[in-house]
């Protein structure tokens, strides 16, 4: 079955760049999405179709792709960016798959 | 603005059923697919399936086939998720989320409904 792999955790200092990767078979041929989930809150879409930002998402969030790995980059990371981040793609075009999530700590 | 408002927390005994609602507003209910996503305590997001509010078509993740039902009421712009024969493993938060386009991003999420299964 189609799986997405993310690192479980990442720590960065405020102001640094955080790069969260997500890899999967043939992921380079699929659109990918990223969600931010802060503690006790619902997920929020931060990147869609590889690199597009929804309205209201700061431009320090960006998405990129290289081969079968996609990356969510947060430039100038702020304390408010501390959250769990999930990548998502479609399997067979009708089923959603989420990565296991990456816990971003800003310290 | 677009909103998805879910029903309140539920506590059920093992073997019982539960029905969670997701009331939508601010957009044309029949124009966008709705998904359901489960999050067990301390765990990641698990996709359950989607419903096409226009015609009621559904698609489920394999783990949820046969014991989960997704329905909708177009007159009230509300989607429903029913879980049967609950087990303790079904404890978690259940989210509804709107599909941005046909099989695109999940752009708007409900606030989540906590379901606790315990004897």
Image (spheres, rainbow, N blue to C red):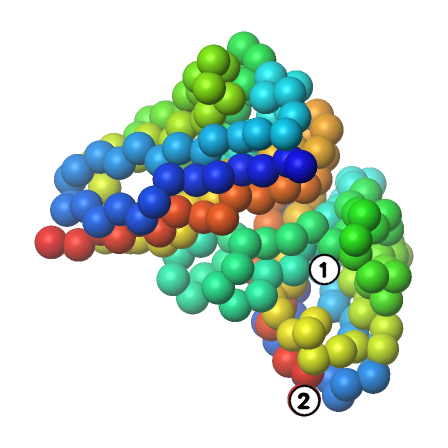
A58 or B62, nearer to the observer:
A58
Determine the residue located farthest toward the top in the rendered image. B55
Identified at 59% across, 21% down, the residue is: B29
Residue B94 visible in the snapshot: yes
Relative to B53, B20 lies left or right: left
In the rendered image, residue A44, in percent from the top left (x then y), is placed at 65, 53
- For disc 1, the neighbor class at 10 Å (few under 14, some 14 to 19, many from 20) is many
In the rendered image, residue B61, in percent from the top left (x then y), is placed at 48, 35
Question: Residue A82's mark?
Answer: none
In the image, residue B84 sits, relative to residue A81, either above or below, namely above
* Residue carrying label 2: A107
Whole-angstrom CA distance, mark 2 to mark 1, is 23 Å
Determine the residue located farthest toward the left in the rendered image. B119
- For disc 2, the neighbor class at 10 Å (few under 14, some 14 to 19, many from 20) is few
Identified at 71% across, 34% down, the residue is: B100
In the rendered image, residue B64, in percent from the top left (x then y), is placed at 39, 35
Relative to B27, B77 lies left or right: left
Question: Residue A22's mark?
Answer: 1
Q: Earlier in the sequence, mark 2 or mark 1?
A: 1
* In front: label 2 or label 1: 2
- Image quadrant holding the N terminus of chain B, namely top right
In the image, residue B5 sits, relative to residue B75, either above or below, namely below
In the image, residue A72 sits, relative to residue B99, either above or below, namely below
The chain holding disc 2 is A
Q: Quadrant of residue B73?
A: top left
Q: Are marks 2 and 1 on the same chain?
A: yes
Residue A25 visible in the snapshot: no
């Amino acid at each position: 079955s189609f799986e997405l792999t993310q690192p479980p955790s990442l720590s960065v200092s405020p102001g640094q760049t955080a790069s969260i990767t997500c890899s999967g078979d043939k992921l380079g041929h699929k659109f990918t999405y990223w969600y931010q989930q802060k503690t006790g809150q619902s997920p929020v879409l931060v990147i869609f179709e590889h690199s597009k930002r929804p309205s209201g998402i700061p431009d320090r969030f960006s998405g990129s792709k290289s081969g079968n790995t996609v990356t969510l980059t947060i430039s100038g990371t702020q304390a408010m960016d501390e959250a769990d981040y999930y990548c998502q793609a479609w399997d067979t075009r009708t089923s959603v798959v989420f990565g296991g999530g990456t816990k971003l700590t800003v310290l | 603005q677009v909103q998805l408002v879910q029903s309140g927390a539920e506590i059920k005994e093992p073997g019982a059923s539960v029905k969670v609602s997701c009331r939508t507003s601010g957009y044309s209910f029949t124009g966008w697919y709705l998904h359901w996503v489960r999050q067990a305590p301390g765990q990641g997001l698990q996709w359950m399936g989607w419903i096409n509010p226009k015609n009621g078509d559904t698609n489920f993740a394999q783990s949820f086939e046969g014991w989960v039902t997704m329905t909708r009421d177009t007159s009230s712009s509300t989607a429903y998720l029913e879980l049967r024969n609950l087990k303790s493993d079904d404890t978690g938060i259940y989210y509804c989320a709107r599909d941005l386009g046909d099989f695109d991003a999940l752009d708007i999420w409900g606030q989540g409904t906590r379901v606790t299964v315990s004897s």
